[in-house]
Image: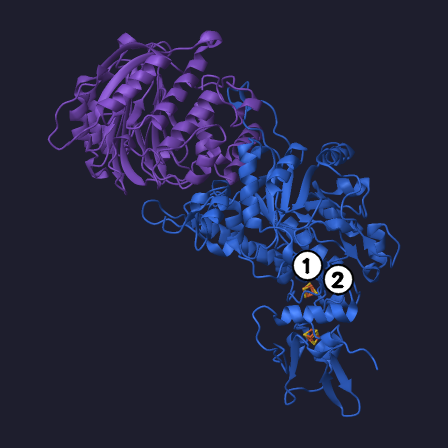
């Protein structure tokens, strides 16, 4: 059985890579493999993974569940659960190759589903669908022993496991996919749970996150998220980042730029000097979202159907580089990891502490495209924000 | 034959005078407010009455030749684990006088001090500690209600701005405030010192229940005015004088009873400030006579808000008692902007010994329980929690915040900074250090500038230590410490205790 609730919080150092085509053209897996494999020294063979967007055009309106299971029985339980709670469009094993160094890998299967609402709920809107899926994911992870949802977004998927990036790429046949956004991770955990689910990317819906760092404010962040019903069971920093993004951007309707100012806020001495309106906003963000501030060294890349964002902590204690050539943007922990796939970028820069690099695709580039550059109406009424708010679906 | 006074036979302290060093200047006689030093005119020597000594060390500290040492009285009773001298002497006192045992400061019983069973974390290798000398380190804290989310909109210039302003909050530059200690209990000089220190440090001091002396109105933006059951000195200008009003329901040193300022302490100035006749006892009743339920509290909170046109925050201070979590939840729902929880170890200028020592629960457990309850109910953001009672050092502050407090109050620590030696006799009005007295001669011993400097130095030093500890934990802002139990580990606590504190044991 897998113990999803780890006893101690994991700590790790890591390498990151991300690529996005702003017009939604597909980029071969080759690129991301090269970029992350160049950063081999940043991992220790205990975890690597990839996220790819645009890989399931034929099922673009279905939520793609990548399920990892330790046994056939666990997989059957997931199937049983999904058949009750969703409409199943299509399912298949995730194609893998035999890799000498990877012994006894778990089973991987993908399911393309749509929420199945009963009764009145049938008329629910799309945002409600997202909540429904989030709850499904939480339920599978929590209740079905030996099964774990690796990813659950539309037209995207995550592939991750225990091994070096080249081994994981080989295993999941990453070279056979084409995507308009790629992210990748090479992991150096300081403890060795040796569990495939512990690798990055971490995902929820179409959010995927790869992360290098240790979040010293983890305890505060976790308690803060609990207020809104998020259960942090994996004890990884990355999980916390994923939920904070989901809360701030999807639920509270904050634009990405503002959400980044919550996670990596400017110092008071900068805020005090800012023009009045900006000062008022930044002060309010720090007062209200103190519990969502990520304190400690980190560099993260997060992606969604429509964009890729890189962000550093407020004093830049972990490396992050960005580059552009034409319509393609690159981000990575090392400049070399960019140059290996793009030797002559038009621009290369090291983003400043707390200054996000936000790259969104041109409008209308891809199906179900999302944009989070503008404030959106919040999705919930204030009184519903308490933790006692449970969705009728549960 | 006169009835023997047993308590007098067994003094607590022993005044040791080195006659070789004594130059008979009689300074000790002038310094001791209890008359323990006596000049023997016949023999032309100094003598002492040990039974009068309260152990304040004033004579020892001021003797120009260092001829005096105050010791614990060496006379001993036969060992008995149960009947210690403390209990024996207390019984003598009560048998002699037939009264309630009186004392001051906070709980003196050796209950488990949870702060002393919690250790802090620091970074090693996997994340770097931050050096506060080189990097900014932020302690700014906001007291008051916050919404659960921020709504933004796009302005004309395409920049984002706040859609509606946040409710009023008080900004503190350091999460340490000065607890309620009244003018009357303390000298006006100490109040001036506290007020000025609060101003320079960017924090707040609290008037206590004794009203606000006219000379202190200028410190309004750093003042919390208190509204206690006696309503002394309470009028609309007073309520409007500060930035917050604190309704005092109870106090950690004496939960369930009111206050008593003896008539001897009610001088001209105090009479004016408190609006009571000179020389009359100022007795605040145990309950507020208009608060017999939580609805009544709500009534008073809103009466005060109305009276001040919603410009002031209203704090409610309670003693940490068994049901503190449920009570705090009620207070939050009644509309308070901050809840002050004063624990078992909270100090006082005068309390019955039984109350000081045995009523209430430790602040560490109370903060954790209250924070947890408010979170469970989804209302934690609506109030701030201020922890008070028994905060002795900056590590205690850090631990209190990691347990869920937004800020702390210090009282005793600020007085010790002014020279208090914890003689625990504040209620006599004879404080030889010029702190807990209003005797015009005695208060000269502590000028306001000295009080200010000492209190300011103390908090500045603590703030610096807090920054160092935050940096070591890899944090550069205090909000990342709030409720962060990961930074705490227990040493030598039981499972239940750790569950209540929500901490793991060291090594886990
Ligand atoms: S009461 Fe204070 S001043 Fe008086 S003898 Fe004792 S220590 Fe000295
Ligand atoms: S304030 Fe004065 S009377 Fe009170 S304990 Fe301190 S030294 Fe003694």
Q: Name the residue under label 2.
A: B100
The residue carrying pointer 1 sits among few (fewer than 14), some (14 to 19) or many (20 or more) residues within 10 Å by Cα, namely some
Instruction: Find ligand 2 in the image and state its quadrant.
Output: bottom right
Residue beneath the point at 45% across and 14% down: A128
Q: Position of residue A223 (x, y in %)?
A: 47, 36
Q: Can residue A154 be seen in this view?
A: no
Where B449 sits versus B203, above or below?
below
Name the subunit of mark 2. Answer: B
The chain painted blue is: B
> Who is closer to the viewer here, A109 or A303?
A109
Q: Do the residues labelled 2 and 1 touch (CB within 8 Å)?
A: yes
Circle 2: is it few (<14), some (14-19), or many (20+) Cα within 10 Å? few
Q: Is residue A171 left or right of residue A182?
A: left
Residue B337 % position (x, y): 65, 36
Q: Is residue A291 in view from this perspective? A: yes
Left or right, B47 with respect to A1, comes to: right
* Chain A palette colour: purple
The answer as to whether the residues below labels 2 and 1 share one chain is yes
In the figure, residue A200 lies in which quadrant? Answer: top left
Judge by depth and name the residue closer to the eye, B111 or A23.
B111
Q: Residue furthest right?
A: B277
The CA distance from mark 2 to mark 1 is: 9 Å
Chain of the residue where label 1 is placed in the rendered structure: B
In the displayed structure image, the side of residue B427 where residue A283 appears, left or right: left
In the image, residue A25 sits, relative to residue B483, either above or below, namely: above
Q: Is mark 2 on a helix, strand or loop?
A: loop
Q: Give the residue at x 67% y 86%.
A: B22
Given residues B280 and B505, the one toward you in this image is: B505
Q: Quadrant of the C terminus of chain A?
A: top left
- Which residue position is annotated with label 1? B354
């Amino acid at each position: 059985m897998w113990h999803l609730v780890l006893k101690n919080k994991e700590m790790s150092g890591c390498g990151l890579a991300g690529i996005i085509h702003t017009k939604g053209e597909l980029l071969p897996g080759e690129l991301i493999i090269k970029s992350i494999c160049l950063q081999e020294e940043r991992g220790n063979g205990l975890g690597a993974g990839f996220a790819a967007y645009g890989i399931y055009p034929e099922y673009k309106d279905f939520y793609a569940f990548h399920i990892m299971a330790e046994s056939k029985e666990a997989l059957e339980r997931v199937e049983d659960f999904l058949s009750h709670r969703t409409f199943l469009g299509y399912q298949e094993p995730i194609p893998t190759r035999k890799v000498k160094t990877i012994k006894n890998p778990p089973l991987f299967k993908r399911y393309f589903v749509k929420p199945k609402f009963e009764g009145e709920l049938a008329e629910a809107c799309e945002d409600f669908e997202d909540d429904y899926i989030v709850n499904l994911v939480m339920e599978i992870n929590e209740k079905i022993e030996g099964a774990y949802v690796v990813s659950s977004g539309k037209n995207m998927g995550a592939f991750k496991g225990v091994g070096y990036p080249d081994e994981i790429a080989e295993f999941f046949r990453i070279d056979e996919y084409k995507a308009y956004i790629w992210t990748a991770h090479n992991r150096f955990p300081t403890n060795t749970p040796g569990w495939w689910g512990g690798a990055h990317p971490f995902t929820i819906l179409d959010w995927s996150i790869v992360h290098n760092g240790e979040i010293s404010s983890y305890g505060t962040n976790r308690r803060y998220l609990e207020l809104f019903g998020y259960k942090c069971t994996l004890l990884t920093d990355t999980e916390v980042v994923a939920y904070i993004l989901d809360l701030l951007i999807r639920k509270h309707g904050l634009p990405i730029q503002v959400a980044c100012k919550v996670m990596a806020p400017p110092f008071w001495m900068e805020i005090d000097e800012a023009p009045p309106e900006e000062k008022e906003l930044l002060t309010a963000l720090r007062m209200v979202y103190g519990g969502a501030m990520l304190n400690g060294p980190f560099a993260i890349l997060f992606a969604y159907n429509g964009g890729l964002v890189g962000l550093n902590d407020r004093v830049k204690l972990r490396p992050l580089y960005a580059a552009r050539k034409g319509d393609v943007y690159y981000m990575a922990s090392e400049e070399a990891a960019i140059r290996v796939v793009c030797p002559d970028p038009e621009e290369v820069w090291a983003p400043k502490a707390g200054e996000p690099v936000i790259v969104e695709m041109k409008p209308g580039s891809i199906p179900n495209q999302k944009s989070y550059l503008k404030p959106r109406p919040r999705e919930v009424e204030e009184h519903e924000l308490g933790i006692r708010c449970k969705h009728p679906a549960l | 034959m006169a009835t023997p006074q047993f308590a007098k036979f067994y003094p607590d302290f022993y005044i040791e005078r080195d006659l070789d060093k004594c130059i008979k200047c009689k300074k000790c006689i002038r310094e001791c407010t209890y008359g323990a030093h006596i000049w023997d005119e016949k023999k032309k020597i100094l003598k002492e009455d040990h039974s009068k000594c309260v152990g304040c060390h004033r004579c020892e500290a001021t003797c120009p030749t260092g001829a005096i040492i105050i010791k614990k009285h060496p006379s001993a009773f036969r060992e008995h684990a149960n009947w210690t001298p403390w209990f024996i002497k207390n019984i003598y006192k009560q048998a002699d006088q037939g009264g309630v045992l009186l004392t001051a400061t906070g709980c003196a019983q050796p209950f488990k001090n949870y702060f002393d069973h919690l250790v802090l974390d620091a970074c090693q290798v996997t994340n770097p500690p931050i050096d506060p000398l080189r990097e900014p380190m932020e302690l700014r804290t906001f007291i008051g209600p916050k919404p659960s989310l921020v709504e933004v909109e796009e302005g004309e210039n395409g920049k984002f701005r706040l859609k509606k302003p946040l409710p009023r909050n008080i900004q503190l530059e350091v999460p340490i405030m000065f607890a309620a200690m009244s003018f009357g209990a303390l000298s006006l000089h100490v109040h001036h010192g506290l007020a000025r220190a609060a101003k320079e440090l960017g924090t707040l001091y609290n008037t206590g229940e004794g009203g606000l002396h006219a000379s202190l109105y200028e410190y309004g933006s750093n003042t919390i005015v208190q509204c206690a059951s006696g309503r002394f000195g309470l009028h609309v200008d007073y309520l409007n004088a500060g930035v917050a009003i604190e309704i005092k329901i109870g106090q950690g040193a004496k939960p369930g009873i009111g206050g008593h300022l003896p008539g001897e302490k009610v001088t001209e100035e105090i009479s004016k400030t408190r609006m009571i006749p000179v020389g009359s006892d100022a007795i605040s009743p145990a309950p507020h006579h208009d608060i017999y339920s939580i609805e009544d509290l709500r009534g008073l909170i809103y009466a005060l808000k109305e009276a001040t046109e919603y410009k002031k925050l209203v704090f409610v201070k309670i003693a940490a008692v068994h049901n503190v979590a449920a009570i705090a939840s009620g207070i939050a729902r009644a509309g308070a902007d901050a809840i002050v929880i004063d624990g078992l170890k909270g100090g006082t200028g005068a309390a019955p010994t039984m109350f000081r020592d045995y009523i209430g629960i430790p602040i560490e457990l109370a903060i954790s329980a209250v924070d947890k309850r408010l979170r469970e109910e989804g209302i934690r953001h609506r109030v701030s929690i201020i922890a008070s009672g028994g905060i002795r050092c900056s590590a205690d502050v850090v631990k209190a915040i990691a347990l869920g407090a937004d800020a702390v109050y210090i009282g005793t620590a600020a007085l010790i900074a002014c020279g208090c030696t914890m003689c625990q006799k504040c209620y006599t009005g004879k404080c030889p250090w010029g702190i807990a007295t209003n005797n015009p001669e005695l208060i000269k011993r502590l000028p306001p500038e000295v009080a200010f400097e000492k209190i300011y130095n103390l908090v500045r030093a603590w703030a610096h230590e807090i920054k160092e500890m935050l940096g070591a934990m890899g944090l550069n802002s205090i909000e990342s410490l709030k409720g962060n139990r990961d930074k705490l580990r227990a040493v030598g606590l039981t499972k239940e205790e750790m569950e209540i504190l929500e901490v793991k044991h060291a090594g886990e």
